[in-house]
Image: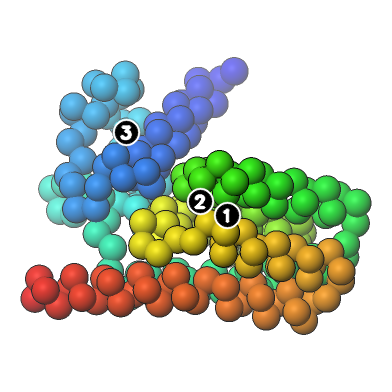
């Protein structure tokens, strides 16, 4: 492996670790990223850490300010609105595409994604349901075979995972979540493109709207 490849691998590993800490809440919104301490903890150079932070800034998870100060991004009502409405559009398009080209691979992968969600819901494992929720939609986007749709989804992927984690702390009915996704799976596998598109377009809205309202109230309280 070349030196450049090794450096890229270290950058990717650091990015993954920091991304997971932010999404899990271990690094909460508004907290300052202390580069020296974090680089020492992870056993990486500050250059590698800064490369990771630049990627996370592109993903909207951190904010880099003047004099190299970096903070975990604080979520706003506008952020929540933009993420869930963007998800609605992209996931609806992906669902319609996949419903129009159902193959054995599609049946196998989507069915497995729902099986994972069902197992998590049965175990009342909220974290596992959230992760299965994300993987289900990621699976549909991947199966669409639409490179530009996938690229656009990638721009909001980290924020999508973050918002899924936060919305799961509000009013997250595990059985209801499973039923909604089961219905979407059935529409796709039956080849009902229009029905799949409608279900995928609308199912994010209740959680998204609740998140927007919660953040608006927090913003008004702080103003």
> Looking at the image, is 46 positioned above or below residue 90?
above
User: In front: mark 3 or mark 1?
Assistant: 1
Left or right of 129 in this view: 67 = left
Front: mark 3 or 2: 2
Residue 47: x percent and y percent? 31, 31
> Are the residues at dot 2 and dot 1 in contact (C-beta closer than 8 Å)?
yes
**x and y percent of residue 176 in the render?**
57, 64
Tell me the residue at 75%/79% (across/down). Answer: 195
Question: What kind of element bears circle 1?
Answer: helix
- From the image, tell me which residue sits under label 1: 133
Mark sitting earlier along the chain (3/2): 3
Q: Could you tell me how many numbered marks the image carries?
A: 3
Spatial separation of the CA atoms under disc 3 and disc 1: 30 Å
> Quick check: can you spot residue 97?
no
Q: Which residue is mark 2?
A: 130
Indicate the position of residue 84 as horizontal and vertical percent values: 47, 71
Q: Would you call the spot at circle 2 few (<14 residues within 10 Å), some (14-19), or many (20 or more)?
A: many
Q: Which residue is mark 3?
A: 49
User: Eyeballing the image, is 222 above or below 16?
Assistant: below
* Residue 178 falls in image quadrant: bottom right
Q: Whole-Å distance between the Cαs marked 2 and 1?
A: 5 Å
Q: Residue furthest left?
A: 223
Q: Is residue 165 left or right of residue 77?
A: right
Depth check: give the residue in front, 185 or 223.
185
| Residue 40 lies in quadrant | top left
């Amino acid at each position: 492996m070349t030196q450049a490849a090794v450096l890229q691998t270290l950058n990717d590993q650091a990015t993954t670790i920091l991304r997971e800490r932010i999404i899990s809440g271990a690094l909460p919104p508004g907290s300052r990223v202390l580069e020296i301490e974090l680089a020492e903890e992870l056993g990486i150079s500050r250059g590698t850490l800064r490369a990771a932070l630049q990627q996370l800034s592109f993903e909207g998870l951190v904010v880099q300010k003047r004099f190299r100060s970096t903070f975990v991004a604080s979520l706003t009502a506008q952020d929540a609105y933009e993420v869930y409405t963007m998800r609605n559009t992209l996931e609806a398009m992906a669902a319609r595409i996949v419903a129009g080209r159902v193959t054995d691979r599609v049946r196998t992968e989507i069915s497995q994604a729902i099986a994972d969600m069902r197992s998590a819901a049965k175990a009342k494992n909220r974290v596992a349901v959230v992760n299965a929720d994300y993987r289900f939609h990621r699976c549909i986007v991947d199966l669409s075979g639409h490179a530009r749709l996938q690229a656009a989804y990638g721009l909001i992927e980290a924020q999508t995972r973050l918002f899924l984690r936060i919305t799961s702390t509000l009013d997250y009915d595990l059985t209801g979540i499973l039923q909604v996704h089961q219905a979407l799976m059935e529409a796709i596998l039956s080849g009902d493109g229009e029905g799949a598109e409608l279900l995928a377009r609308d199912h994010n809205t209740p959680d998204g709207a609740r998140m927007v309202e919660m953040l608006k109230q927090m913003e008004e309280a702080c103003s």
